[in-house]
Image: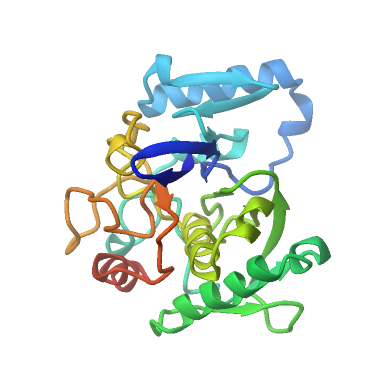
Amino acid sequence: MLKTMFKGAAVLAVSCGVLSGCGTDGTDAQLDPQAENEEIISNLVEAGFPADDIMVADGLVYVGRDAHVTLEASREMLRPSEVSAEQYRTTNLVSTSTVKKICINPTSTFNSYTRLSQGLDLAIANYNGLGLAFTMARGPTTGCNANITAQTMSGTGGSAGFPSGGKPYGTINIGTGLNSYSVDVNEHVITHELGHAVGFRHSDYYNRSISCGSGGNEGSAGVGAIHIPGTPTTATVGGSIMNSCFRSTETGEWTSSDITALNYLY
């Protein structure tokens, strides 16, 4: 859950790290919503998530209050890891053997907000400036191995999801309220959400109060929250673009630990 912070006070909270798989398999159509949710909950418990950290709201299953879990994503947690040691023991990463170009496709509504649009260009430049195994491009364009739709939501935050099937999550949602903030803050939030889409958890997932002023552990269960070698084991305010909460003074630029993490994974 991503919050805006002013002088240590939480102003607004919206969802941020949405743990969600892309697509379903042929058996999903045979399950009614209640049976599907029961299986998701069962899979989460088996994967190690505390039962009191799982909730159902509006017909969807969440962990850590803001992480939506689909049926396929819950099943994926129980499968043996097939990724190499360099990418941790998790299924929630982008496969650089098949994904070389990720295209970010803003909707017309997204483009109508000037600072959101500018922030997207800067966020894409953040990733491309590191010489990673994949590049990002603003769509519409050609040669895309994977696509992410950039669309709007209410509020001043964002939401996204984790990779599934070796591809990044297919959508980032950015709050239209951010258009009243600086371009740098927009760059920060969009870079953050793209970070989730390629597999990053909050850097302070274990204690949200570090960047948010309140909140606890989002839960890791050994899935998608394994420490990246070479990066700090503790989070600090302003220490990472992937902190749970952001400030109105954010620059939108990577920190040294962000760069280390990205270079290690990709």
**Residue at horizontal 18%, vertical 48%?**
234
Task: Give whichever of 210, 4 is nearer the camera.
Answer: 4
- Where is 184 relative to 76, above or below? below
Q: Position of residue 51 (x, y in %)?
A: 41, 15
**Is residue 78 depicted above or below 197 in this figure?**
above
250 is higher (above) or lower (below) than 122: above
User: Horizontal placement of 43 versus 116: left or right?
Assistant: left
Q: Quadrant of residue 212?
A: top left
Q: Check the image and name the residue furthest to the right.
A: 108
Decide if residue 78 is in sight here: yes
- 257 lies left or right of 48: left
Where residue 165 appears, as percent x and y from the top left, is 56, 55
Where does the image place residue 179, in percent across and percent down from the top left? 65, 60
Q: Nearer the viewer, residue 215 or 219?
A: 215
Q: In the figure, is residue 166 to the left or right of 31?
A: left
Residue 104, given in percent of the width and then of the height, sits at: 65, 70
- Residue 100 in view here: no
